[in-house]
Image: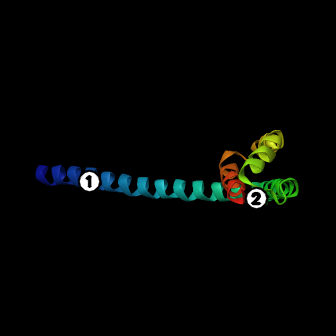
Amino acid sequence: MERISKNWDVLSFLGALIGGIISGLFTYLGVIVSNRKSEKDRFLDTYDIKKTALEDAIFEIKLNFVNIQHLEPYNRIVALCEKLTLIKDIIGRLKEKVGGTSIRGLLTSIWIMF
């Protein structure tokens, strides 16, 4: 009889261990799904604001830098130096509204224009 009770103790321990592992995995998966959903919701909440800010900045850049790419290299540099404060102002406003990662793509597109 004593041997049977010792086997039950081991089986009880293994059952509790396996149950704990399984419940831990389900909890972990639940946390991952919850985090992904909150990231998606946060992105959707700020998307319109960021999109509008970027579109306004692109419009302002196109408005102020029309035909600058057709200038000779020296004149292009002079024109860019004159517009440098405007570029800094646009970037500052974007940092406040959008954040740094989106600005990096915008700056890349600005340099491609020139």
- For this rendering, which residue is in front, 111 or 101? 111
Specify the quadrant that holds the C terminus: bottom right
- Measuring from the top left, give residue 91's x and y in whole percent: 77, 44
Residue 94 at x, y percent in the picture: 78, 46
Q: Are marks 2 and 1 in contact (CB under 8 Å)?
A: no
Closest to the observer, 46 or 51: 51
Q: Quadrant of residue 70?
A: bottom right
Q: Amino acid at mark 2?
A: Gln
On screen, residue 113 above or below 5: below
Q: Residues within 10 Å of mark 1 (few under 14, many from 20)?
A: few
Decide which of tag 2 and tag 1 comes sooner along the chain: 1
Foreground pick, 6 / 47:
47
- Element under label 1? helix
- Colour basis: rainbow
Residue that badge 2 annotates? 69
Type of amino acid under label 1: Leu
Q: Is residue 44 visible?
A: yes
